[in-house]
Image (cartoon, rainbow, N blue to C red):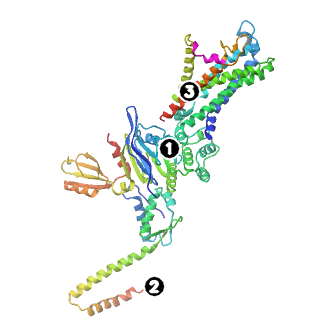
Amino acid sequence: MPDTHVIETHQLTKRFGDFHAVEALDLNVRSNQITGFLGRNGAGKSTTIKMLLGMTHPTSGTGALLGRSIDDPRANREARRHVAYVAEDKQLYGYLTVEELIRFTRSFYADWRPDVAARLLATYQLPPQRKVRALSKGMRTKLALLLALSRQPELLILDEPSEGLDPVGIEELLQTLVGAASEGTTIFFSSHQLPEVERIADRVCIVDHGVLVEDFALDALREDYRRITFGFAAAAPDDELLIPGIRRVRRAGRQLSLVVSGNAEAVAARGRSMNAVTVDVAPISLREVFLESVQDDA
Amino acid sequence: MLFALNPSAGVPVYLQIMQQVRHAIDTGVLQHGDVLPGIRTLAQELVVSHNTVAKAYSELQHEGLIEMRHGSGAFVLARHRSTPDTETIRLAQQRVRTLVASLRRDGISENAIRRLIEAELLIALPARSPTPR
Amino acid sequence: MMLWYKAWRESRVRFLASSVALAVICASFVFLHRDVSPGMSDEPLTYPVYIWHITYKGYLRELFLFLTIFLGLGGLTRERDLHTIGYTLALPVSRFRLLAVRSAVGAVEVVLLATLPAILLPVLSPLVGQTYPPSQAWGFAILWATVGTLTYAMGLLASVLFGGEFTAPVAACSGLLGYSLLADMSGAKRYLSDIHDVMSGLDMPYFTEQTGLLSGPLPWATLLAVTLGTALLVVIGLCVTNRQDF
């Protein structure tokens, strides 16, 4: 299956007055993968997603959703036929019943699959006659997923989908996403739940202050990224360690802590050649990489 | 089959799956003909990306440990068992070669070597016959 | 198209409540006319004049205008406050269509509200021994429907420009008030008509205050101008909506 990009942005920028919500973002999301979109609150995740869906107009830069330009409302509308979106608040029309909302949504999509909708309705145990405003947050999330997945969209975009869910709800959500992905839906979701992202995502993009700071495959994180800690008996060397692969350097007393994205052996050897008395190479979790990526003030 | 996966262990998850399948086959927990769940089912059960499971299955099939069937998961092939025998024989071969070479260097004739080895096997024979328990 | 259904469901309660309110007040004007009429002036009023004073020039008019603004509320800005905007704008429909359908449904509702008195007055008046000519009632209905859609469009535009539950109606009412004041200024009288007077016929050539009856041809030119004004407001609303960031 050819690897196409479901989302592409080029120098995408959104400024609200002086505030740079998104700055020169070059995002590329591949199809047939689960991609996690991480960042602190206010880093620009929601704004980016809104620009992709035509809800917000970019200040500058371009973007494409399923190959169609986001600047062209008609093209974007055409793309949205094949994109499902679960917004952060998961609010749906409170005055409709579950059944009415399903009928409403169904009318807009030619690829609606009533058998899937019926199955999900039963699996999620959603009461068809209940008004949407009377549903709990967990049930609203399930309803939003039902509305999204009954269409077999090419791309499913979720903004903080696990927000407000209890652990069981989160587990069910992840299973649903994995199931949808295995049927061909590309998943792009933003989340603060790093362990969950670490479990199901194939790839992760991290934004900070509106800028893309990391873009890696999780297998690369596991295989190549390492935390290397050098301990020195004398003062830790001051000179710049210019070895390819070093992403972050932190100094603490007589120790240097490095995050490397590859070349761990070469870096460790270099440390020994600089008379490090302790060289510790350890795997690094997604949470640690995330915290390292966003802690520095850009 | 039950898996114990650690997404933060510094080892790609697909490798962890492969290691655990291999270990299960080696110890006999998974035997020839046992069924492994389909990619989608296992992905949902383990809550990992289907790409991870697909890669693990693909590599395991490449190694001849499993065979994937369209839509019905994968079957374990215990052909893996034969490999240790071949390997052991090969190593034994090298040891014999080394021993014969050193005996020859010491001046022992080929006939003498043959008689020595046969005598050794005859002595060892009673110990190797199966004794009822 | 389900968008019509959505617009209806979102305005349904307001429309039905407005209908009930107008109907009840209208009916009460008819049934209580013997009690209310004497207190309204020193000389006894004829029935049509009474009806005109209290309905087409009086409280009912103000209530009707307010209700049309009320019907114009809602829309995407409101959905942003309710957080359903993500769902709505992700649908494969244009913002133009969303607003156009909402406008159309609201306009129809306004017209229906305007015709309520036209139906009730001729029907209920005989019950108190009076008559009210249907032709009169329908004449006023046309005036009201036309002006009502203008004020509805004011409410609609306000709902596009302002978020929050109260800002939009306050803005629209202020706009309406401002326009009335402007039109009342002596210099403007030649160019602008106070739409309140268009609705009631006060000082208008097509209405005779003595008899309380519409007496001449309806001011079609003025009504056309009002309708164009309505269209203009809706078009402005569409342009603004297309440019907004949600």
Which quarter of the image is occupied by the N terminus of chain C? top right
Q: Which label number is shown at residue B132?
A: 2
Question: How far from the left and from the top, in percent, is residue C26?
Answer: 72, 21
Residue highlighted by disc 3: C232
Q: Quadrant of residue B119?
A: bottom left
Q: Quadrant of residue A99?
A: top right
In the image, B11: left or right of A1? left
Chain to which mark 3 belongs: C
Say what amino acid the circle numbered 3 marks: Leu
Q: CA distance from mark 1 to mark 2?
A: 82 Å
Q: Residue at x 51, y 63 (%)?
A: B38
Residue highlighted by disc 1: A75
**C21, above or below B50, in the image:** above
Answer few, some or many: residues within 10 Å of disc 1's Cα (few below 14, many 20 plus, some between 14 and 19).
some
Q: Residue at x 50, y 48 (%)?
A: A156
Marks 1 and 2 belong to one chain = no
Q: Which residues are magenta?
A: C189-199
Q: Secondary structure at mark 3?
A: helix
Question: How far from the left and from the top, in percent, is residue A125?
Answer: 60, 49
Question: How far from the left and from the top, in percent, is residue A109?
Answer: 58, 47
Chain to which mark 2 belongs: B
Marks 3 and 2 belong to one chain = no
